[in-house]
């Protein structure tokens, strides 16, 4: 009898050939293995994770705490005006509002999140305050903003002229279609540059970061402006604990990027951690979580991206995505600027 996994593998191979794991030329392996005791590591989604990792490493390297490292790390893309998918400079919703989602979690199950937060540059820091200074996990919209202001965060306009211009351009058709986010370098077409918006092709991205510090403590953070041109009030996976981020000190952590609706439907990051708890490697766990999405959404999966990134408590790292082009950045004592390609279900991802 065909078991479920070999069935799925066979049917995927049949459904959308060529179905291959992609191995890029630009990137140096190997995928990071277990850490020796007393050493730290931080990983994050996409190429822009390199700069974020380096900020996190400034804390982890000298022996600092993973929770502080992930907060500081993801603040980098939150402030990067060229990054149109995270924080200030992010593309707005269809009504022109930049609304931010973020979550943070430590190894003991402490967590905090904000969703649809406006006018605050660092939603990750508000999420941390929710975790540390309220009895709640998630604050949204006007309530999240009220809390942020009460905590001393300054309001500012997050809609940059560049993002506003892109929004006006979008309004000409006002057609909502998530485009596949990808960091694919195609030497034939683009001279080795990532295509599309800064941070790669696509109209959405997230920085999801996982860190383990020298004392073996894990933490994770996740922050995004969500899908460009989304409906007002739409919230993605990033601030939903168990969807965009999950950490369990006994097992490891996972985070996601891509079309958040699909991640939420499958409690994606929680699933990855639970699979690791059952003995899967980070790579195998991410792959199984991606395959579940693809199995449920066979047709839709051909045109969307979802990627998972995971690290277990030994510091082993793995990733998997629906489409080619998902990358992740790894930083540890050996190397602070590594970017690796994730394997994927489909071999091609963009036009
Ligand atoms: N997961 C994010 C969201 O759905 C977007 C992304 O990571 O591409 O809001």
Image (tube, rainbow, N blue to C red):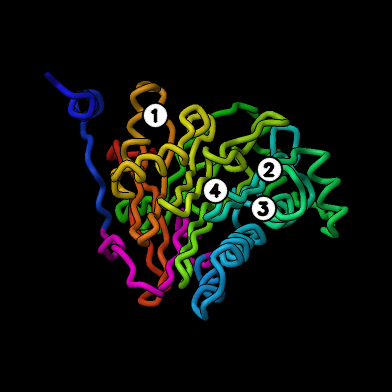
> In the rendered structure, which segment of residues is drawn in magenta?
25-52
* Residue that lies at the very extreme toward the bottom in this rendered image: 62
Of marks 4 and 3, which one's residue comes earlier in the chain? Answer: 3
Residue visible at 36% across and 29% down in the picture: 292
- Residue indicated by mark 3: 87
Q: Main secondary structure of the magenta part?
A: loop
- Residue indicated by mark 4: 206
Disc 4: CA contacts within 10 A as few (<14), some (14-19) or many (>=20): many
- Residue indicated by mark 1: 293
Residue visible at 59% across and 55% down in the picture: 83
Q: Secondary structure at mark 4?
A: loop
Observer-nearest residue: 118 or 249?
249
Q: Position of residue 179 (x, y in %)?
A: 49, 36
- Measure how far apart labels 1 and 3 are at the Cα level: 27 Å
Q: Is mark 3 within 8 Å of ligand 1?
A: no
Contact between marks 1 and 2 (CB within 8 A): the answer is no
In the depicted structure, whether residue 30 falls above or below residue 311? below
- Measure how far apart labels 1 and 4 are at the Cα level: 18 Å
Disc 1: CA contacts within 10 A as few (<14), some (14-19) or many (>=20): some
Magenta span includes 199? no
Contact between marks 4 and 2 (CB within 8 A): the answer is no
Q: Quadrant of the N terminus?
A: top left
Rendering quarter of residue 140:
top right
Residue visible at 54% across and 48% down in the picture: 206
Q: Quadrant of the C terminus?
A: top left
Numbered tag placed on residue 137 in the rendering: 2
Quadrant of the rendered image holding ligand 1 = top right
């Amino acid at each position: 009898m065909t078991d479920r996994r070999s069935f799925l593998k066979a049917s995927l191979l049949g459904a959308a050939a060529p179905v291959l794991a992609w191995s890029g030329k630009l990137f140096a392996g190997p995928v990071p293995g277990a850490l020796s005791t007393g050493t730290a590591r931080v990983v994050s989604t996409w190429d822009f994770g390199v700069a974020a990792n380096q900020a996190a490493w400034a804390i982890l390297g000298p022996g600092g705490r993973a929770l502080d490292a992930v907060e500081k790390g993801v603040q980098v893309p939150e402030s990067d005006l060229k990054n149109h998918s995270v924080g200030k400079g992010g593309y707005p919703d269809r009504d022109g509002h930049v609304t931010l989602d973020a979550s943070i979690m430590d190894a003991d199950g402490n967590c905090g999140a904000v969703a649809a937060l406006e006018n605050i540059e660092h939603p990750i820091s508000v999420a941390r305050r929710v975790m540390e200074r309220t009895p709640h996990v998630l604050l949204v919209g006007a309530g999240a903003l009220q809390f942020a202001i009460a905590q001393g965060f300054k309001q500012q306009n997050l809609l940059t002229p560049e993002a506003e211009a892109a929004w006006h351009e979008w309004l000409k058709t006002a057609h909502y279609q998530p485009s596949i986010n990808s960091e694919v370098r195609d030497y034939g077409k683009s001279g080795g540059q990532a295509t599309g918006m800064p941070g790669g092709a696509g109209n959405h991205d997230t920085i999801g970061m996982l860190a383990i510090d020298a004392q073996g403590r894990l933490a994770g953070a996740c922050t995004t402006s969500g899908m460009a041109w989304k409906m007002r009030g739409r919230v993605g996976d990033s601030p939903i604990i168990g969807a965009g981020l999950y950490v369990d000190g006994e097992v490891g952590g996972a985070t996601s990027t891509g079309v958040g609706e699909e991640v939420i439907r499958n409690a994606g990051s929680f699933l990855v951690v639970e699979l690791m708890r059952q003995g899967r490697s980070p790579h195998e766990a991410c792959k199984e979580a991606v395959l579940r999405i693809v199995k449920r959404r066979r047709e839709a999966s051909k045109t969307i991206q979802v990627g998972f990134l995971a690290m277990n408590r030994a510091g082993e790292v793995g990733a998997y995505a629906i489409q080619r082009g998902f990358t992740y950045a790894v930083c540890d004592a050996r190397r602070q600027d590594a970017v690796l390609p994730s394997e994927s279900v489909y071999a091609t991802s963009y036009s």
